Amino acid sequence: MCIPGQVASNAALVIRNYSRDHSFFLELSDYFWVTRESQFPFPFGTNGSEDILSQVLGVANDFSIPHEIKRLPCRRCVVIGSGYRMKNSSLGDIIDKYDIVIRLNNAPVHKYEEDVGSKTTLRLFYPESAFFDPVLDNNPDTLLVLVPFKNLDIQWLKTVLNNETMVKKGFWKKPPLIWKVKSQNIRILNPYFMEFAATKLMQYVLTIRKMSVRPTIGFMAISFAIHFCDMVHIAGFGYPKINDSLPNHYYDKSIMKKMISASHKVPLEAMIIRKLLQHNVIQNLTYF
């Protein structure tokens, strides 16, 4: 049963200074008509990226939440992690019954429907992970939500929207050069949710000189969901041990060592997710 405001009430008891008084997506008015100074650059703020943001948001000129979501009396959400435990889970039919299905990066749907479902309401991604099939892995009305980690990510979005020459340097992996999606389906996530994940959940103190912490997209999606939804369920979270022979994802053979080598604090994230589960802020469809 979905109870309006339940996640917000439970989160407020566990998370210090929890508040829903923040926009979900960046809007042109933030950088054109009104000047808002941000303390940090991406991924925790927009400092230094205001000009390029105003150009991109002028093209992707829809910043709203779709009416179909707005009118819901209670938002029932599920965040689908990319973990190996989704394989052979047979959760597809259950997942498709949620109002809002949030997927991550290039996690495929096509050929995995029995385990992960076929519905995609929002897909959170960054340029290097934008290799999903826009037709087979998304629905026609899926919101593609860019999670910017650096100024170059916004530059990439500008080039693909305007068919400009791509800047190839500065990415750890070459992003798509051609990206055929509708501009009205694109949103840019408010960096507040990345800051919230790092400071409110992970308890890090951010400084301009030292900003090496990078919450995973999955952890950040949970951070977003506990602000956006009235019910938050997760599936496919939890990772194999570093020396485990199991793949990290349900759809490829990548292993845990690759994630550990990045600037992610996976053990800390796992501990926080367990805490959120214990306090009924979120609930789990798979084992953790």
Image (cartoon, grey):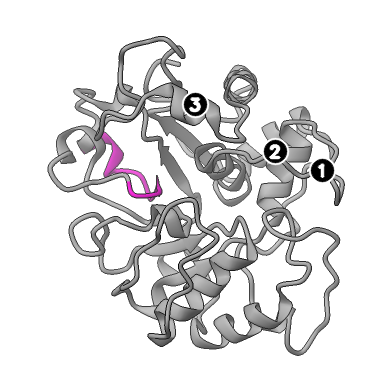
Residue at which label 1 appears: 210
Residue reaching furthest to the left: 111
Q: Residues within 10 Å of mark 3 (few under 14, many from 20)?
A: some
Residue at the far front in the pictured view: 169
User: Mark 1 or 2, which is nearer the eye?
Assistant: 1
* Residue drawn at x 76%, y 44% as measured from the top left: 211
Above or below, 194 against 243 in this view is: below
Please tell me whether residue 109 is drawn above or below residue 63 in the rendered image: above
Bin the neighbour count of mark 1 within 10 Å (Cα to Cα): few under 14, some 14-19, many 20 and up: few
The correct choice, above or below, for 129 with respect to 287 in the image is below
Mark 1 or mark 3: name the one nearer the start of the chain. 1
Task: Write down the residue under mark 3.
Answer: 283
Amino acid type at image mark 2:
Val
Does the segment drawn in magenta span residue 104?
yes
What's under tag 1, amino acid-wise? Lys
Q: CA distance from mark 1 to mark 3?
A: 33 Å
Amino acid at dot 3? Gln
Q: CA distance from mark 1 to mark 2?
A: 8 Å
Q: Secondary structure at mark 1?
A: loop
| Magenta stretch: includes residue 184 | no
Labels 3 and 2: the sequence-earlier one: 2
Callout 1–callout 2 Cβ contact below 8 Å: no
**Residue 213 marker:** 2
Measured along the vertical axis of the image, is residue 13 above or below residue 60?
Answer: above
- For image coordinates 83% across by 43% down, the residue present is 206
